[in-house]
């Protein structure tokens, strides 16, 4: 809603009525809930996935010789 400048000045000087304050609180709560949901959804979307090693790294890991205890030599 657009209010005339004189009413806006009055509101600045005298504050909100109880009903207007409750409405503003409800709007602020809805906005906070929407932002929280958005943050959670984005966090899930960009969370690193648990993936198996790429084939090249898995093959490299298998070709590394196992350490031989010195008592066997």
Image (tube, grey):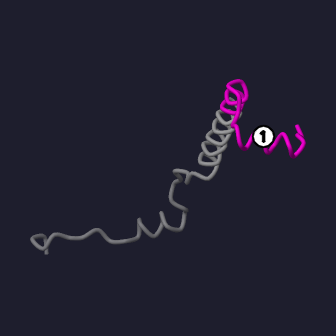
On screen, residue 25 versus residue 56, left or right, reads right
- In the image, 49 versus 13, the foreground residue is 13
**Residue appearing at x 70%, y 37% in the figure:** 14
- In the image, 51 versus 22, the foreground residue is 22
- In the image, 60 versus 49, the foreground residue is 49
**Residue appearing at x 59%, y 48% in the figure:** 43
Q: Secondary structure at mark 1?
A: helix
Magenta part of the protein: which range?
Answer: 1-25
In this view, 26 is above or below 48: above
- Quarter placement of the C terminus: bottom left
Q: Around disc 1, counting alpha carbons within 10 Å, would you say few (fewer than 14), some (14 to 19), or many (20 or more)?
A: few
Measuring from the top left, give residue 45's x and y in whole percent: 64, 48
In this view, 4 is above or below 71: above
Could you say which quadrant of the image residue 17 lies in? top right
In this view, 46 is above or below 7: below
**Residue appearing at x 45%, y 70% in the figure:** 60
The count of marks equals 1
Give the main secondary structure, helix, strand or loop, of the magenta stretch: helix
Measuring from the top left, give residue 31's x and y in whole percent: 69, 38
Measuring from the top left, give residue 38's x and y in whole percent: 67, 43
Instruction: Tell me, yes or no, whether the highlighted magenta stretch contains residue 12.
Output: yes
Measuring from the top left, give residue 69's x and y in whole percent: 16, 69
Name the residue that disc number 1 marks.
10
């Amino acid at each position: 809603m657009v209010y005339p400048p004189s009413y806006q000045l009055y509101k600045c000087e005298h504050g909100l009525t109880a009903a207007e304050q409750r409405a503003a609180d409800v709007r602020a709560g809805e906005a906070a809930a929407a932002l929280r949901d958005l943050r959670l959804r984005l966090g899930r979307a960009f969370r690193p996935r648990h993936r198996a090693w790429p084939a090249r790294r898995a093959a490299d890991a298998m070709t590394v010789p196992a350490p031989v205890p010195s008592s066997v030599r």
